[in-house]
């Protein structure tokens, strides 16, 4: 769910070896509405690796 909310992520690639793992990964979508900006900020602070995005995209 964090990957989906992260503005620096354009695509989320799921790694699953079987259908159960795939369903567990897809289940993260249910957490998405619970991820407030303060929770995302706290996760970013804990990880300590938030990249900087210029968002230029060759205007």
Image: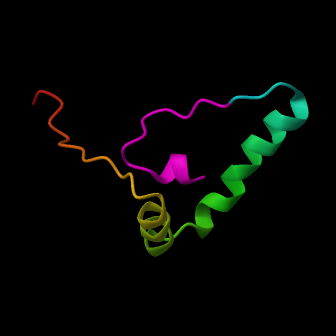
Question: Is 49 in front, or is 3?
Answer: 49
Residue lying at the far bottom in this picture: please name it: 38
Q: Eyeballing the image, is 30 above or below 38?
A: above
In the picture, measured across the screen, residue 52 lies left or right of residue 37, that is left
Name the residue located 17 percent from the left edge and 43 percent from the top edge: 54
Is the stretch drawn in magenta largely helix, strand or loop? loop
Q: Quadrant of residue 19?
A: top right
Query: Is 39 positioned to the left or the right of 10 in the image?
Result: right
**Residue range (magenta):** 1-14
Left or right relative to 38: residue 26? right
- Is residue 11 inside the magenta stretch? yes
Q: Residue at x 80, y 34 (%)?
A: 22
Counting the numbered discs, the total is: 0
Q: Which of 46 and 9 is in front in this view?
A: 46
Residue at figure coordinates x 67%, y 60% from the top left: 31
55 relative position to 13: left or right: left
Q: Does the magenta stretch include residue 33?
A: no
State the quadrant of the C terminus: top left
Colour style of the rendered protein structure: rainbow
Which quadrant of the figure has residue 9?
Answer: top left
State whether residue 6 is above or below residue 46. above
Q: Position of residue 42 (x, y in %)?
A: 46, 71
Horizontal and vertical percent for residue 18?
87, 26
Determine whether 54 is above or below 46 in the image: above
Residue at point 44%, 75% (across, down): 38
Q: Position of residue 14 (x, y in %)?
A: 66, 31
Farthest residue in the left direction?
Answer: 59
């Amino acid at each position: 769910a964090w990957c989906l909310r992260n503005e620096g992520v354009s695509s989320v690639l799921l790694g699953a070896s079987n259908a159960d793992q795939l369903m567990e990964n897809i289940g993260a979508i249910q957490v998405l509405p619970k991820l407030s900006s303060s929770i995302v900020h706290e996760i970013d602070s804990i990880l300590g690796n938030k990249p900087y995005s210029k968002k230029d995209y060759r205007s």
